[in-house]
Image (spheres, rainbow, N blue to C red):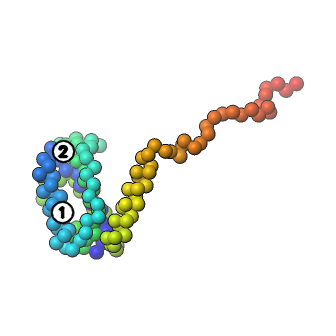
Amino acid sequence: MRYYETTLITRPGLSETAYGEILDRVRTIIANDQGTIVKEDDRGLRKLAYQIKKESQARYILIKYGAPADAVDEIERIFRIDDRVLRYLTIKLDDTFDAVACAAAEKEIAKQDSADDDGSSVDDDIDVSNDDTDESDDDTDE
């Protein structure tokens, strides 16, 4: 089994049931091939950089999972057939998949992201005041 990340872009006007059907189908394919879903993330409705199939907005969905290559082929076949899916991209993250290690890594990344969002910044520690009182810069050379 390998570790994959699939991002799909769906039509913006999908009902929650249609959205659920797409995700349920992906979950079923992965489960039938003894795969494991590590993370599902609905990134929400976003404006597209250019129109895709006459749509200027789309709903982004990110799924990270471990599965054999046959499962990925089947998921992508379903996405090609389904006209509710505008685009998709699957990336192989790693050649090996360990569900426990991947879940722990995802939690660590989430913890770091939440720590970064608490308002503290590296720029807060930098002193940008310009208090140069060097007397060699004086224009009085007498």
Query: Residue 102, can we see it?
Result: yes
In the rendered image, residue 44, in percent from the top left (x then y), is placed at 25, 47
Place residue 47 in its image quadrant: top left
Relative to 118, does residue 99 appear above or below in the rendering? below
Residue 126 versus residue 96: which sits nearer the camera?
A: 126
The residue depicted at 12 percent of the width and 59 percent of the height is 81
Residue assigned mark 2: 12
Relative to 24, does residue 45 appear above or below in the rendering? above
Q: Secondary structure at mark 1?
A: helix
The amino acid type found where label 1 is placed reads Val
In the rendered image, residue 80, in percent from the top left (x then y), is placed at 16, 59
Query: Residue 51, can we see it?
Result: no
Q: Quadrant of the C terminus?
A: top right
Residue 120 versus residue 70: which sits nearer the camera?
A: 120
Q: Secondary structure at mark 2?
A: loop
Image side of residue 51 versus residue 136, left or right: left
The amino acid type found where label 2 is placed reads Pro
Image side of residue 104 versus residue 10, left or right: right
The residue depicted at 18 percent of the width and 64 percent of the height is 27
In the rendered image, residue 96, in percent from the top left (x then y), is placed at 34, 74
Residue assigned mark 1: 26
In the rendered image, residue 55, in percent from the top left (x then y), is placed at 19, 43
Query: Of the residues under marks 1 and 2, which one precedes in the sequence?
Result: 2
